Image (cartoon, rainbow, N blue to C red):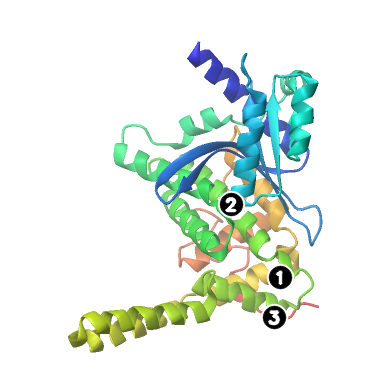
Amino acid sequence: MARKQAEQGARTEEILRWYFLEQGFFVVRALKLRHNSVDVTDVDLWLYQRPSALVRERIIVDARDRRQAKAMERILWAVGVRDMIGVDRCVVATTDRRSEVKEFASKGNVVILDGRVLSRLEGHFASATGRLTEENFALEVFPRGDEKLLRDWRGRIDESKARLLHGISFDGCNAWLEDAGYFLDAARPGLPQGDAALRLAYLTLAFFLIGLDWVMRHTAFEERDSRIAHLEGGFRFGSKGRDGFENLLRTSESLLVKFFPDMSGTAATVRNRARNELNTLPAEGLAQFFARSDVYLKLFPMACTFEQAAFAENLCRPSELDVPLQAVVGAVLDFFGSSRTGFLGSDNSGVASVNAHTEVEK
């Protein structure tokens, strides 16, 4: 019985994911809400939408397709998670059709999708094709037979998803960028598990672009130079910026000298080395690329397309993607100093390097 309920629950989540994708949302399924290293609860669906240049919307969805749905308990759960993580809205999908459920939900500003809606969506979903389910995706991408690699990849993706729930920031964007670089490196043709790694590279690139869309939401009407500065500071120093990084260095150095006075010279050397490494990070080229209007304005749709590519039944190579998406792959490869060969035809392919995007926009 428990297995049957789990299978039905997974199907309901897939139906809801399909529905929200059709409505134009970016959708992620099966996220773990964590506090430090502790798994607190699971979130069935996380939705992101960009209705306009100034507005972003984040929504969580709780799906329960069981004989005893306990809808009112789920409403309380959804409200608590919504308020704790600071998303805009929450939705509860339940087989319960009682009017009292909707009345109770309205008190917490919760949207209810009841059994009538779910039945109607299931009828439409029956004809949906072309995508892997979350369960089939897991079978495709997580390497079997290599337990260490399995734990590493699964852990990376679980953490990648979890970042979406904890307030998107430049720190998260930089972590997604690292994940994308890692999986692109593992996806080179001829490597074992290359196709699986490519799917995960597409997925983490999608998260990265969603993160950029969020952290740049206040720069919609700023000049390109201002966007470049905002991005470069974020890529180089993270969410706290240059001032926060310098404060961290000074605090770390003072604490080290306080408790180990003989290491004052070593502390200064470490401080200077950390500063030099960050200053040599190729953040400027990446910032110039993503600050371009023809890229910046397409972050959300490109994220959606990368997500579709990750879950497509028929996996496509980067060279088969649309040119704007190839440019994003090329930009990330350039940032890590990786060769484009095997991804985009050659190092001198028709997709320009991020270092070439220094022209002034008209």
In which quadrant of the rendered image does the C terminus lie?
bottom right
Query: Does residue 148 appear left or right of residue 213 in this picture?
Result: left
Q: Give the alpha-carbon distance from disc 3 to disc 1, as whole Å.
A: 10 Å
Q: Amino acid at mark 3?
A: Asp
Residue type at mark 2? Phe
The amino acid type found where label 1 is placed reads Arg
Q: Position of residue 252 (x, y in %)?
A: 34, 78
Q: Position of residue 238 (x, y in %)?
A: 51, 70
| Quarter holding residue 272 | bottom left
Q: Nearer the viewer, mark 2 or mark 1?
A: 2
Up/down of 242 relative to 235, above or below: below
Q: Name the residue at the bottom extreme.
A: 265
Q: Position of residue 219 (x, y in %)?
A: 73, 70
The picture quadrant where one finds residue 286 is bottom right
Compare marks 3 and 1 and give the one earlier in the sequence.
Answer: 3
Q: Secondary structure at mark 2?
A: helix
Asked whether residue 201 is in view, the answer is no
N-terminal label among 3 and 2: 2
At 64% from the left and 35% from the top, the residue drawn is: 76
Nearer to me, 260 or 178: 260
Quickly name the residue at label 1.
Answer: 292
Residue positioned 27% across, 80% down in the render? 256
Distance between mark 2 and mark 1 Cα atoms = 19 Å
Q: Residue at x 64, y 64 (%)?
A: 215
**Mark count:** 3
| Foreground residue among 316 and 65 | 65
Q: Tell me the tag on residue 207.
A: 2
Say few, some or many: other residues with alpha carbon within 10 Å of mark 3 (under 14 / 14 to 19 / 20 or more): some
The residue tagged 3 is: 225
Q: Say what secondary structure mark 3 lies in.
A: helix
